[in-house]
Amino acid sequence: MAIDSIKARHNIFLVFSYIFAVVMSIFTVFPIVYTILGSFKTNAELTQGGSFFPSVWHFENYAKAFIENDFITYGLNSIIVSVGVLIIAVFTASAAGYVFARKDFIGKKIIFSAYSALVFIAMGSVTLYPTYSVLTTLHINKSLLGLILALVGGQITNVLLVTGFVKTVPVELDEAATIDGCSQYRTFFQIIFPLLRPILAVVALFSFRTAWNDYLTSFIISIFTPRIKTLTVAVVQMQYSINAAAEWHVMLAGASIAIIPILILYMFAHKQFINGLTAGAVKG
């Protein structure tokens, strides 16, 4: 009887788990599906409501987004900025994480503690003015490079993730490399760096997503230089046409276009991404 009771409770738990997973999947996927289907509707059909699926599929919404609103240029800007942020974030987070995990230097504990404390402090828009002032001083406030550096930030969370992951890598690998005559740089790039692929996939995906979806920083920096405007900024500014009427159908077409790069990146990095999160949960 006891075994039957345990099995019954286990089955009930599985049923509720499946129901919860299905409900959460619906809540997660529904906005994406609605956005994609809405991008094929007319503006009137969207604002007045109606059927979930378009009565007539208007593919010209995408043509209008690309041609009339110059989404090719803004999309290219977003790709350049996001890839640039990704590359810098992967390099800086991996190097800093390796140093914090492996090296001893004066003030290490104080620096690491202060650095870690910043995770709990949300500066938000407060940092926009000093960031823009620094970029202006360096004369890169009107370039994509300035926007990339502004979006890279301090990489606090990424550095902590890499630091925890590096600590799970055997120190004997470093010692063996030193005995073989490898320099610190060669040890890091040829031995440690390849082993960090799972956690660096997490860093890369988060960094790309943050840069791609950013609006406020990109808007502030590109406000006087429209040519460096990103796709997210262009989509939001497309809310109103010349006649001051919200063009929601074109906005949803632009939003659908903006979703594609994130999905493509996740398709290529999802295995490493899951492995990195799992390793961090088990070992970190």
Image (spheres, helix red, strand yellow):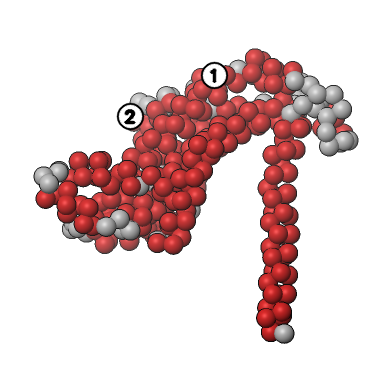
Which corner quadrant of the image does residue 215 belong to?
top right
> Which label was assigned to residue 73?
1
For badge 1, the amino acid type reads: Thr
Q: Quadrant of the N terminus?
A: bottom right
What x and y, as percent, mark residue 230?
Answer: 54, 27
Tag 1 secondary structure:
helix
Q: Is residue 78 shown above or below 27?
A: above
Callout in the foreground (1, 2): 1
Q: Nearer the viewer, residue 168 or 254?
A: 168
Viewer can see residue 115: no
Q: Quadrant of the C terminus?
A: bottom left
What x and y, as percent, mark residue 61?
Answer: 73, 21
Q: Nearer the viewer, residue 8 or 274?
A: 8
Q: CA distance from mark 1 to mark 2?
A: 25 Å
Circle 1 packing at 10 Å, graded few (<14), some (14-19), many (20+), is some
Residue at image position (46%, 60%) is 281
Which corner quadrant of the image does residue 203 belong to?
top left
Q: Is residue 261 shown above or below 205?
A: above
For badge 2, the amino acid type reads: Leu
Question: Residue lying farthest bottom?
Answer: 1
Q: Is residue 245 shown above or below 269?
A: above
What x and y, as percent, mark residue 53?
Answer: 83, 33
Q: Nearer the viewer, residue 26 or 134?
A: 26
**Residue under circle 2?**
138
Q: Earlier in the sequence, mark 1 or mark 2?
A: 1
Q: Is residue 106 shown above or below 26?
A: below
Tag 2 secondary structure:
loop
Residue at image position (43%, 56%) is 279
Viewer can see residue 276: yes
Question: Residue lying farthest top?
Answer: 67
Circle 2 packing at 10 Å, graded few (<14), some (14-19), many (20+), is few
